[in-house]
Image (cartoon, rainbow, N blue to C red):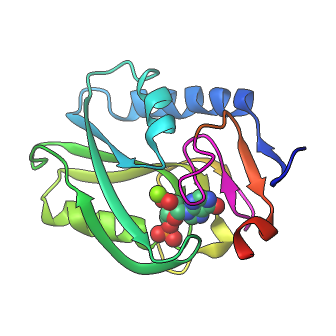
Amino acid sequence: MEYPFEKILITEKEIKDKIKKLANQINKDYKGKNLIMICILRGAFVFFADLIREIKIPVELDFMAVSSYDSQTQSTGNVKIVKDIQDTVDDKHVLVIEDIIDSGYTMLNLRNIFKVKNAKSFKSCVLLDKVDRRVVDIQADYVGFKIPDEFVVGYGLDCAERFRNLKDIRVLQRSYYTK
Ligand code: IMP
Ligand code: MG
């Protein structure tokens, strides 16, 4: 494979199949409920766009941007809202859509934010889960793939804003971001 990728970790087809399964579950779990799905920008935008098109129940959509990283690959624990959602959620069941859960700081902060916003319920759906990297005690409610502790890019995930456009998920060579 061409520089700077080590390998393809998850193929386009595998992602597509998994999204159908996740959406089926969401369709069942939220039937008859006032659902709002919130895309966490920017990493989740590709996943979000594919997932919502498999949702068959009525759903509101919104977008939120948070930033948690000081450097390119290290989490800090502090999450700030860069762009907030447009509406109130006190009469809605919130399902946050994220690209990846790593240390868990982002998700923990999001859960607290929606508690303050008085959401009817809060759940999360992540495409990727780096289980071994968790620092805070939080799980995602819907998980696409559990992955090892490697830095991945593609399908919305970036390294310094690059590679979001790849159709699959790839492991980035360490030398690319450590030099
Ligand atoms: P956490 O707060 O440490 O759980 O980090 C979550 C955020 O870290 C995600 O939304 C991503 O933006 C970023 N992140 C963590 N691991 C990776 C990775 O392997 N590739 C790209 N972004 C990552
Ligand atoms: Mg992100």
Q: Residue furthest right?
A: 1
Reply yes or no: does residue 88 show up in magenta: no
| Coordinates of residue 143 in the picture (x, y in percent) | 56, 49
| Coordinates of residue 164 in the picture (x, y in percent) | 58, 44
Instruction: Tell me where residue 108 sits by quadrant.
Output: bottom left
Instruction: Tell me where residue 73 sits by quadrant.
Output: bottom right
| Coordinates of residue 172 in the picture (x, y in percent) | 75, 58
Q: Nearer the viewer, residue 142 or 66?
A: 66
Chief SS of the magenta region: loop
Where 16 sits versus 102, above or below? above
- Span highlighted in magenta in the image: 147-164
Residue depicted at 64% across the width and 44% down the height: 154
Where 57 sits versus 42, above or below? above
Q: Nearer the viewer, residue 158 or 48?
A: 158
Instruction: Tell me where residue 130 sits by quadrant.
Output: bottom right
Residue depicted at 90% across the width and 44% down the height: 1
Residue depicted at 74% across the width and 76% down the height: 179
Where 14 sits versus 63, above or below? above
